[in-house]
Amino acid sequence: MLSARNLTVRRRGRAILDGVSLDLETAQVTALIGPNGAGKSTLLHVLSGALAPCAGEVRIAGRPLGAWRRADLARLRAVMPQSSELSFPFRAFEVVLMGRSAHAGRSSEARDLEVALAALEAVDAGHLAERVYPTLSGGERQRVQLARVLAQIWPETTSETTSEAAADTASDTASDGLNPLPSERLLLLDEPTNNLDLTHQHQLMRTARLWADRHGVGVLAVLHDPNLAALYADRMVVLADGHLAAQGTVDEIMTAPVIGRVFDLAVTIERHPTRGAPQLMPV
Ligand SMILES: Nc1ncnc2c1ncn2[C@@H]1O[C@H](COP(=O)(O)OP(=O)(O)OP(=O)(O)O)[C@@H](O)[C@H]1O
């Protein structure tokens, strides 16, 4: 779905991303982990097209990022940045409706509202719909922002209005009218669990998992908690000092040598008692 090759970004003469290559597959959740300053947000900016790399290339569905029309790209992949400040007194549902702007001319106002409200329900924020966004808590805002990106890539074939949306995603047509858009979608999430309480952290990751499994969405999430990542992700990509330190399945990455080397932390790995996923403990 997405392939990135040899991405390099330099700032002040320093490579903050240095020759990073990765692939994101449909229907998979990939966790991007690494120490502070490793380059995770920078990589997400480059993958989303918000930042042009000094070298390297990103392709989505085989097409270079720059060759996509903005509106087509916006219906294919949604990006949740690390923070989204809004000073205007928008109501929460209006913030979520912003995610529907990519569908202008293709979707009715009624359908957009239906999707926005369903997306809020999907992140346990239906009760916040009428609240004024700047008055929400950090975690409440975070859930509204997640609803916004879900609304942006919401499956279009059904009028399903629950968090378990449609079982099948529509094929769509690019605005050049020639090439069908791939039916799969991408979600790029930068530290989506910031400010979320324990319950909502797990709920967010369950939502990411559900969208990967049910709708074939490829999810990349920057996460600071490897244990949370290991419970929900298929793969982990580890950045350290701008370099790709490791990538692989959760079992390949959640090992004492890899985690110890990257985070400079001695750990032991245990299995989750019921789910079997590897969980690390500092020693
Ligand atoms: N515009 C910039 N100018 C100079 N340095 C920058 C700029 N943007 C980022 N950096 C530096 O690049 C490095 C990577 O930053 P980035 O925000 O991508 O890291 P991160 O892995 O997301 O960190 P964190 O986990 O702390 O959020 C950091 O050392 C940061 O200070």
Image: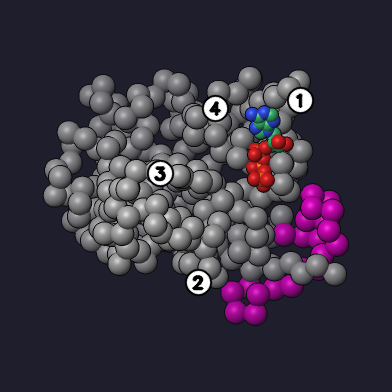
Residue 229 vs 35, above or below: the answer is below
Q: Is mark 1 within 8 Å of ligand 1?
A: yes
Residue 134 vs 271, above or below: the answer is above
Q: Which percent across, then down, holds residue 26?
A: 46, 46
Residue range of the region highlighted in magenta in the rendering? 254-276
Whichever of callouts 3 and 1 sits on the residue coming sooner in the sequence is 1
Q: Which percent across, then down, holds residue 242?
A: 72, 35
Picture colour scheme: one colour
Which amino acid type corresponds to the residue marked 2 in the rendered image? Answer: Thr
Which amino acid type corresponds to the residue marked 3 in the rendered image? Answer: Leu
- Compared across the picture, whether 132 is left or right of 191 comes to left
Whichever of callouts 1 and 4 sits on the residue coming sooner in the sequence is 1
Q: How many marks?
A: 4
Q: Which residue is mark 4?
A: 51
- Does dot 3 land on a helix, a strand or a loop? loop
Q: Which percent across, then down, holds residue 84?
A: 46, 45
Q: Which residue is mark 2?
A: 199
Q: Which residue is mark 1?
A: 14
- Compared across the picture, whether 126 is left or right of 144 comes to left
Which amino acid type corresponds to the residue marked 1 in the rendered image? Answer: Arg
Mark 1 vs mark 2, CA separation in Å: 39 Å
Q: Is mark 3 within 8 Å of ligand 1?
A: no
Mark 3 vs mark 1, foreground winner is 3
Mark 2 vs mark 3, CA separation in Å: 25 Å
Task: Tell which of 199 and 174 is nearer to you.
Answer: 199
Q: Which mark is residue 177?
A: none
Q: Residue at x 43, y 32 (%)?
A: 61
Which amino acid type corresponds to the residue marked 4 in the rendered image? Answer: Leu
Mark 4 vs mark 2, CA separation in Å: 33 Å
